[in-house]
């Protein structure tokens, strides 16, 4: 299964969760909106931070959402690769494996 198919499957799973616990998912969505508001850091920079954390904690679903947001923000492959590099520095071998997934996801979503 490719990244695009995984992404659609994940979004469908989240729709099911939204229907089951709507107050919780709405509150979490509000947190995301508040965090993305540009203040000292713009949205793109915050998405790079989020991607680095997603790689470090080995969350494929998080990687997909933050890669998609970074593409929307105009991130380049080189910027994503450098973000992955920082995550590898902080997370070692496991982060390297998920960093490769993040770059592969970026390539597929950007195609």
Image: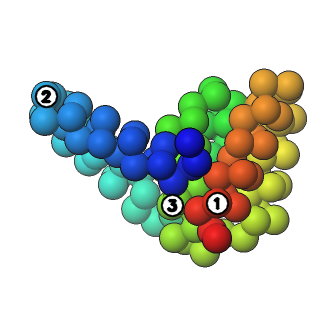
Going from N to C along the chain, the mark reached first, 3 or 1, is 3
Question: Taking 19 as reference, is 43 above or below it?
Answer: below
* Image coords of residue 83 (percent x, y): 76, 51
Q: Mark 1 touching mark 2, by CB under 8 A?
A: no
Q: What residue is at 51 percent from the left and 54 percent from the top?
A: 4
Distance between the Cα atoms at labels 3 and 2? 25 Å
Residue position marked by numbered label 3 in the rendering: 69
Image disc number at residue 20: 2
Query: For the residues marked 1 and 2, what is the alpha-carbon distance in whole angstroms?
Result: 31 Å
Q: Is residue 42 above or below residue 61?
A: below
Q: Judge whether 2 appears above or below 24 on screen.
A: below
The N terminus, quarter of image = top right
* Above/below status of 18 relative to 41: above
Q: Residues within 10 Å of mark 2 (few under 14, many from 20)?
A: few
Who's the residue at 72% across and 70% down the image? Answer: 76
Query: Looking at the rendered structure, which numbered label has been put on residue 108?
Result: 1
């Amino acid at each position: 299964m490719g990244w695009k198919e995984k992404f659609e499957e994940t979004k469908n799973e989240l729709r099911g969760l939204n229907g089951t616990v709507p107050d919780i998912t709405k509150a979490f969505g509000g947190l995301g909106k508040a965090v993305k508001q540009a203040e000292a850091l713009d949205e793109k920079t915050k998405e790079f931070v989020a991607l680095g954390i997603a790689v470090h904690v080995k969350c494929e679903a998080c990687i997909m959402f933050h890669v998609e947001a970074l593409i929307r923000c105009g991130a380049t492959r080189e910027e994503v690769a450098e973000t992955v590099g920082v995550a590898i520095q902080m997370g070692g071998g496991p982060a390297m494996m998920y960093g490769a997934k993040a770059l592969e996801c970026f390539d597929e979503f950007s195609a």
